[in-house]
Amino acid sequence: MTGLQSMFAPMGPEAALIADLAAVLFVGAAVVLTIVVAALWFAMLGSSAARRGLAAERAVIVGGIVFPIVALAALLAYGLWVMRASVASPAASNAMRIEVTGEQWWWRVAYRDGDGRRIESANEIRIPVGRDVVLTLRSADVIHSFWVPSLAGKVDMIPGRVNTLKIVAKQPGVYRGQCAEYCGGAHALMALEVVALPEAEFASWLAAEGAQATDAAGETERQGRELFLAAGCGACHAIRGTRADGRIGPDLTRVGARRQIAAATLPATRENLARFIVDGQHLKPGNGMPPFRVFSAEELSAVVAYLASLK
Amino acid sequence: MRRILYTALGLAAVGSVGLLLFAWSGLYSVAASRGHWPMVEWVLEFGMENSVETHAPNVTPPRLDDPDLIRLGAGHFLFGCAECHGAPGTEVGLVVRGMLPPPPDLSRRVSAWTDQELFWIVKNGIKYTGMPAWPTLDRDDEVWALIAFLRALPSLDQAAYRALAYGDVPAEPQSGEGVAMSGGASRALGACARCHGAGDRPPLSALVPRLHGQPAEMLVEALRAFAAGERRSGIMEPLAAALSRRAAEEVATYYAGLAPLPPTSTVQAESIGRLAAEGDAAAEIPACISCHDRQALAIYPRLAAQSARYLENRLRVLWYAQPRTPTQSIMVPIARRLSEQQIRDLSAYFAGLPPEQR
């Protein structure tokens, strides 16, 4: 099976273990169900000998006590082994570390470059293929749960606690994830994408991600940047290399390079960027950004052109 | 027993039909010139007084001897109330004396009511009397300003009233031609400068915003929002609605061109300055100056050297406001994240900021 966001399409070792566990559970449950239905059939319509056998004390002891204890104990052992394999296996020494913080209703993502400098981004996690990636999971407000089904099981993000999750992507691709713990009104619109890139491509991407924002190229983009700053967007959003240094909302230094906006709610087209600026409360009710209806149509498209140019 | 009941019901039915027929016949005169029968007048007054007493809210008024509150109330009294109720030195108008009931001379009558009863009357108006409700029900703070003025009213003579209500704006045109062209004192009624000051004169009350040197675009937008009823104020909505678009632009340009007034306070707390300049990311409070410094969009107000009491009041009004305008949509959620202490401290901070600094 395939799918952008499916646990039946495992693309990493932990997801593979969980997919196997699921297969064992489904097959085992099907076998048990078959036995139960057969026993029921015999109890009602079987020969009197079969019915006597089912009613015997031994049948109750074997089928009702011994079998469930053995089967469930085996499953428990198997489940513990799966957990141990995914939680306790040490990360490789060259593991990539990425901090992910759940906030209502988006994901703050922070990388470290070679010098340990923090590079902030949002709602899109890029990882190198084949390398261990250790995610440090935190919450800024309520309980969220990080779940990218193709790569790993879900891990809760709990206020005041730091959880970790190791993921490895076997091949390049885009893996969608979703907050898996109800966290308030727009919980269903709190998604993310993990983009796995070949090692070399990832290195050059990370270098670009850590650089200052690209300079506004044209006249429109320059006008857009001035409007962005004058309208106060920088109070909540940071664009490195400008005086916008807000820490409340997502860092926009590379927003033009992202595939989606509003926590993987909408494709990052210019139309959607403009809609979100003016009418974000309808697209994603309750989100922290007030609607900015202070721009004329030309001003809005200049701001959007500037944001789209931040690649 | 049953017979008495049927008789009573029958009489009631006949009475109702009789009343309806009487109203339908048109024999009853609704002429204001004829007055009421003493009996009817007594019933109406008795009902009105008890209704006000019952409905008056059980709230604690603000300090009603606050001079800023009194002056703000005086400014509005002249525009909204004096036309019918008269004022010190001005009798109840001849035209309105023909109303039924005639509007009372307030300096003699206000002492009969408690503060809460007066508040309820001014806010809600009174049915069948011609007394209108406050233009918006969202601005209790403005209503209280008028109550503060009404409490001061009985002790005012003509000169003291004029000084309160007109400020330095000339109350009457000086020349015969002025009277001929403008119709006497009424021309000063809507003058912005009565409350907001002009030239290098500050507003008449610390509760009134200083417009000197604010961006013209912001002022035009504020007048548009008041006129459209999107920004709520019983004082500003009728005044703004009476202005043409051109007049609004002209007056905005005038105030935008004035030199900003000097700061009113010297409070400069270090921590609150940081909140204003950097915000508080953990509490999701953005930095005030991102939108309120000189480099910001001209649709945003500048806060340096604004009156602290006005800023406090404005933030509290925004706290409860239903956002309707583009700028309210941005500011209301932010205002709601501020604590009462932060509102006071930030207002004092910006009031103390020299205007040339931001």
Image (tube, rainbow, N blue to C red):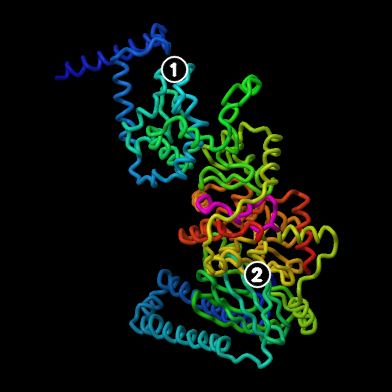
Say which residue appears at 39% left-offset and 28% top-offset. Answer: B106
Q: Main secondary structure of the magenta part?
A: loop
Which residue is labeled 1 in the image? B97
Q: Amino acid at mark 2?
A: Leu
Q: Does B310 lie within the magenta span?
A: yes
Q: In what element is the residue under mark 2?
A: strand
Q: Residue B283: where, in percent of width, then height?
A: 53, 66
Highlighted range, magenta = B292-311
Q: Amino acid at mark 1?
A: Arg
Say which residue appears at 35% left-offset and 13% top-offset. Answer: B36
On screen, B315 above or below A263? above
Q: Residue A147: where, in percent of width, then height?
A: 59, 74
**Front residue of this view, candidates B21 and A189:** B21
> Residue A192 has which mark?
2
In the rendered structure, are the residues bearing label 1 and label 2 in contact, judged by CB atoms less than 8 Å apart? no
On screen, B44 above or below B154? above
> Is residue A193 at all visible to an observer of this figure?
no
